[in-house]
């Protein structure tokens, strides 16, 4: 496989992956997501849930958009899951 083929393959892989949660436009109330709560930032442990509210007002955030889940937990989105 030549270098350009590898580059094209990785671009294709990224296009088929779930959004990573850094862009507000990819998240909406009712979406199923994985978040990292503040207390779990060091371990990276994620919590899966349904978005109730989007708390970050800016269009993007390098560490993930902050949301409140229906369960009441608050964290930064690491992955938006297929519904």
Image: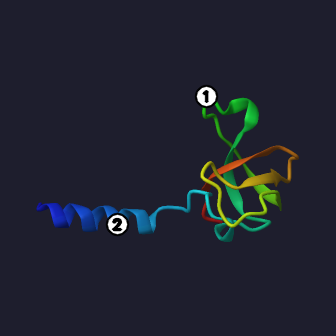
Report x, y in % for residue 52: 84, 59
Decide: few, some or many residues near mark 2? Use Cα within 10 Å; few <14, some 14-19, many ≥20: few
Q: Is residue 73 left or right of residue 8?
A: right
User: Where does the N terminus fall, quadrant-wise?
Assistant: bottom left
**Who's the residue at 25% across and 63% down the image?**
7
Q: Which residue is mark 2?
A: 11
Q: Helix, strand or loop at disc 2? A: helix
Tell me which numbered mark, 2 or 1, is placed earlier along the sequence: 2
**Who's the residue at 77% across and 57% down the image?**
50
Q: Is residue 21 left or right of residue 31?
A: left
The residue sitting at the left extreme is 2
Task: From the viewer's side, name the closer residue of 78 and 30.
Answer: 78
User: Where does the C terminus fall, quadrant-wise?
Assistant: bottom right
* Separation of residues labelled 2 and 1 (CA atoms): 29 Å
Q: Helix, strand or loop at disc 1? A: loop
Q: Which mark is residue 43?
A: 1
Report x, y in % for residue 81: 61, 59
Q: Is residue 73 left or right of residue 37?
A: right
Vertical relation: 8 (above or below) 70: below
Q: Which mark is residue 18?
A: none
**Who's the residue at 63% across and 64% down the image?**
23
Q: How is the image coloured?
A: rainbow
């Amino acid at each position: 496989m030549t270098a350009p083929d590898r580059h094209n393959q990785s671009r294709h892989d990224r296009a088929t992956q779930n959004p990573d949660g850094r862009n507000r436009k990819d998240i909406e109330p009712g979406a199923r997501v994985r978040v990292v709560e503040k207390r779990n930032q060091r371990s990276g442990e994620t919590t899966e849930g349904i978005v109730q509210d989007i708390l970050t007002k800016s269009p993007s955030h390098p560490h993930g958009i902050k949301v409140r889940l229906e369960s009441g937990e608050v964290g930064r989105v690491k992955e938006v899951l297929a519904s």
